[in-house]
Image (cartoon, grey):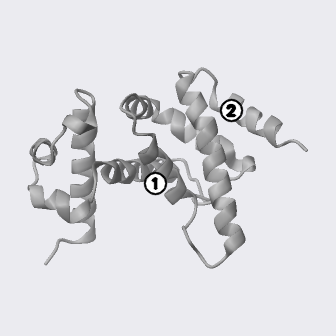
Amino acid sequence: MGGNAKTTEFLKECLADALIKLLRKKPIEKISVPEISETAQVGRTTYFRNFSSKQEAITFKLIKLWERWAEDHGIAERKNFTPENGLTFFEYNYSIKDILTLLYGRGLQTAIYNSFYEIMMPQHGENVLECYKGRFYSYGLFGLLDEWVRRGFHETPQEMQAYINMICEK
């Protein structure tokens, strides 16, 4: 027994939003599942049916934010980031800089990386080169994002793209 996919996605997002709201007030270790469920106004079992961890809920939310942003901006290629289309990556992250800053402040970089890797390409696929390439780009872009967040998003997305171009020059 279960709801339709739209309802499930909506409830999952409500839970993730509730968690992010609570993160603004206290560290993740001090947030309980009943508290998340109450804030989201859904049953506790809904949380356990959909997430195995709080980080998984955050990763889910970041992926949803990307899907919406990509749709709103007419991004056709949504799964394959390369040095050539890094500007899209940085524009998206700049658009959610408040959430990223919050997550960094709470030590949740792993959830951020997991969302990027999941967005960038399928894991453990048949094409070994594509798997390594996806991991390479996801770590590289995450490394740049990591520094950018720590620097307070001082540079523009266009400047970040310029850094990618300089780094990747042959």
Which label was assigned to residue 67? 1
**Mark closer to the chain start, 1 or 2:** 1
Q: Nearer the viewer, residue 73 or 101?
A: 101
Give left or right: position of 166 versus 150: right
Give left or right: position of 152 versus 18: right
**What is the quadrant of residue 56 in the picture?**
bottom left
What residue occupies the far right of the structure in this picture?
170
Which quadrant, please, contains the N terminus?
bottom left
Q: Which residue is mark 2?
A: 160
Q: Residue at x 43, y 32 (%)?
A: 104
* Residue 16: x %, y % from top left: 27, 47
* Label 2 crowd (10 A; few <14 / some 14-19 / many >=20): many
Q: Nearer the viewer, residue 6 or 41?
A: 41
For numbered disc 1, what is the local secondary structure? helix
Q: CA distance from mark 1 to mark 2?
A: 22 Å
* Residue 115: x %, y % from top left: 46, 52
* Residue 92: x %, y % from top left: 53, 41
* Residue 110: x %, y % from top left: 45, 45
Give left or right: position of 100 versus 6: right
